[in-house]
Amino acid sequence: MTGNALQIIDWLFAQDKDKVFEIKEHKEKRSLNANAYAWSLISKIADALRMSKEECYLLMLKRYGQSEIVSVLSEIDVSGYFKYYEPIATATLQGKEFTHYKIFKGSSEYDTREMSILIDGIISEAKEMDIETLPPGEVERIKNMWRTS
């Protein structure tokens, strides 16, 4: 069920009182067009920089993506836990060494606002390299599609 608070409350009152429900805020999903456009530009940037698309994608995530810092015991191999990450520092706490990692959220997990920021950054990079991008009006049209998709 998706709706505003009053609609959800009305709906809940009509449900079996013994059922358990999970409520979370609805966030607009980005369109596949946004993803396709991002990867199109990433491919062109990767070719220009002579790197793989995956390396370029990680570079764009590092520059324009969403991230958090986590601390993990240094003896733990985090490669099975995080897909996109980089170590940034180490520290010792109560005789145990910890490594601090910056972890990057993959774009498939982005909401509309986060994807918009990533796309804007990728477009900026492409323009700096004289890679053709969509006209601003077309980018705005796609962004409007993200808001309603």
Image (cartoon, helix red, strand yellow):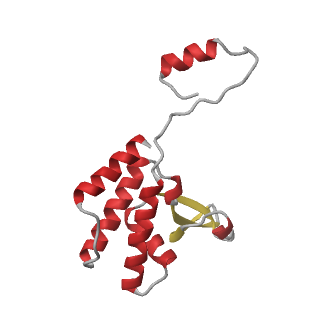
Regarding residue 66, the answer to whether it shows in the image is: no
x, y percentage for residue 5? 49, 20
Instruction: Give the residue at x 34% y 52%.
Output: 142
The picture places residue 21, in percent across and down from the top left corner, at: 67, 26
At 49% across and 59% down in the image, what residue appears?
A: 107
| Residue 102 image offset from top left, x and y in percent | 50, 64
The residue closer to the viewer here, 15 or 20, is 15
Quarter the C terminus occupies: top left
Q: Indicate left or right for 27 with 83 as reference.
A: left
Q: Quadrant of residue 82?
A: bottom right
Give the residue at x 38% y 43%. 147
Q: Viewed as shown, does residue 101 lie left or right of 43? A: right
Check the image and report above or below for 47 versus 90.
Answer: below
Image location of residue 86, percent across then percent down: 52, 71
Q: Quadrant of the N terminus?
A: top right
Q: Is residue 99 left or right of residue 63?
A: right
Q: Is residue 20 above or below residue 51?
A: above
Residue 138 falls in image quadrant? bottom left
